[in-house]
Image (spheres, grey):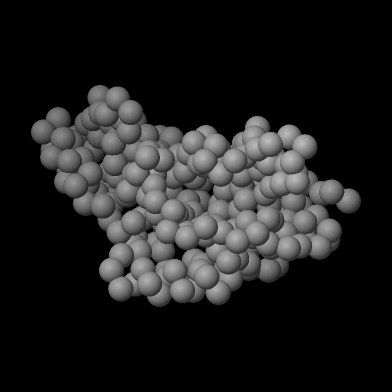
Amino acid sequence: MQILSETLERNGQSLSKAALSKILKEEREWTSEKVQRVTQRAIDDSKSRITTGKGGVIEYLGSEKVASPLLYRQVGKGLGGQWAIDHRLRNARYIDTSHGGHRGAQDWLHPDVVVVGSGRSQGAADSGERWHSFEVENAGRFRLNSIFQAFVQGRGSDYSWVVASEDDIDGEYRERVIWAAKQVGVGVITYRRPRAASTWRELRPALKRSHTRKERSDFLHYALGESEE
C-alpha cells in the first residue's frame, strides 16, 4: 500500500484507475490484476487513507505536507458550501491556510482551513464578518490534543472547530471528547466521507470567541498572511 500511496502523492493525490495502472505497470511492472487487487485492498482498509472519488478516481487523503492537501480541499469545499449555508453565513469562502500565511517560532499557529462569511441577514445585529478556524484531522489522526490545538490556533478567530473521522470519536471516548471541547468552546464535526458533507455530523457547536484587535490582526497575519493594521 505504501507504493500505491506514494504514487498517488507524487501525481496530485488522485488518479483515474487507468492512469494509476499505467504508471504502476511502467514503474513497477505490476500487472493490471495486481493493481486492481492492491487498490481494492487499500480502499477497504480505512487506515490506508486511500479512497474513491467521483467517477471512480482513486484518491490518497494522507498527504498533509504538500502545498494543497486533498483532504483539506475536500473538507474546505464542504465547509464553504452547504455547511456555511446551514450556519447562516452569506458570501462564504474557504481558505486552505495549512501552508499559507507567515511562519513563527510558536506551535499551533496555523489552522488547516479557515471559512469567512457575513451574517445571513443584512442589517441585523449578527450580520458582521465571521471567521471560523478549523483543525482537520485525517482518519486515525485525531487525539484529545486536537481539541486544544484547534483552540490555540484559532486565537483571534470568532469560532474554533475540529473536524475528524467518525471512527476516531466513538463509544465511550466520544463523551470525553465532548467534555474536553466544552471546556474551551471548540466545535466538533465528524465525517464518514470527507468529500460528502451529507455524511458529516456536528457533535457539538463552537461557541463564539472574544478577541482583541491585536489577536485578530495576528490571526490574519499568521494564518492568511494579511493584517488589519
Asked if one can make out residue 31 in the rendered structure from this viewpoint, the answer is no
Vertical placement of 17 versus 13: above or below?
above
Q: Residue at x 43, y 48 (%)?
A: 63
Q: Position of residue 101 (x, y in %)?
A: 70, 49
Looking at the image, which residue is at 51% across and 69% down? 181
Q: Is residue 53 left or right of residue 219?
A: left
Image coordinates of residue 74 in percent, x first then y, are 45, 39
| Front residue (pair 117, 74) | 117
Image coordinates for residue 216, horizontal then vertical, percent: 77, 56
Of all residues, the one furthest to the front in this rendering is 124
Q: Where's residue 123, x and y in %?
A: 77, 37
Q: Is residue 167 above or below residue 18?
A: below
Residue at the spot x=41%, y=64% of the render?
Answer: 142
Residue 188 appears in the picture as rendered: yes
Q: Is residue 206 above or below residue 44?
A: below
- At a point 68% along the width and 62% down the height, the residue shown is 209
Q: For the view shown, which residue lies furthest in the left direction?
A: 33
> In the shown orientation, is residue 140 left or right of residue 155?
left
Q: Nearer the viewer, residue 120 or 151?
A: 120
